[in-house]
Image (cartoon, helix red, strand yellow):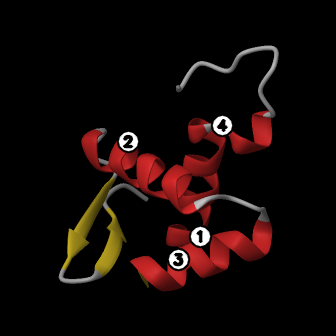
Amino acid sequence: MLIPTPYESLQKNTIIIGGDIIGLLKQKNYNIEALFNELKKLKSTHLNQFYNTLLFLWLADIVELDEHTLILKRK
């Protein structure tokens, strides 16, 4: 769910994780596995949350996938 609830940790919300992913992609392009490993260093996130966030960013036309590399479309 994108809208935070009072019972949810904001650090595990899709929008917050998306912001962290955008921050990492501003530094350099990552392949999906390396991006997940880098994000896990910053905060504990589950693979399912990670994929849901990538789907959200792709649907919002913020990232694109070139082969196995994620590229930030807007800088």
- 67 and 46: which one is in front? 46
Left/right of residue 57 with respect to residue 58 in the rendered view? right
Q: Quadrant of residue 73?
A: bottom left
Q: Position of residue 13 (x, y in %)?
A: 65, 37
The residue shown at (19%, 77%) is 66
Q: Which of pointers 1 and 2 lies earlier in the amino acid sequence?
A: 1
Q: Position of residue 48 (x, y in %)?
A: 50, 54
State the SS at label 4: loop
Where residue 13 is drawn, which disc sits there? 4
The extreme top residue here reads 6
State the SS at label 1: helix
Task: Determine which residue is flagged by label 1.
Answer: 24
Contact, CB < 8 Å: mark 3 with mark 1? yes
Q: Which of pointers 2 and 4 lies earlier in the amino acid sequence?
A: 4
Task: Determine which residue is flagged by label 2.
Answer: 56
Q: Which of pointers 2 and 3 lies earlier in the amino acid sequence?
A: 3
Contact, CB < 8 Å: mark 2 with mark 3? no
Q: Residues within 10 Å of mark 4 (few under 14, many from 20)?
A: some
- 27 and 35: which one is in front? 35
Contact, CB < 8 Å: mark 4 with mark 1? no
46 relative to 32, above or below: above
Q: Position of residue 46 (x, y in %)?
A: 62, 59
Count up the numbered dots.
4
Q: Which of pointers 3 and 4 lies earlier in the amino acid sequence?
A: 4
Give the label, 3 or 1, closer to the camera: 3
The residue shown at (34%, 48%) is 55
Tag 3: residue type? Leu
Task: Determine which residue is flagged by label 3.
Answer: 35
Tag 2: residue type? Phe
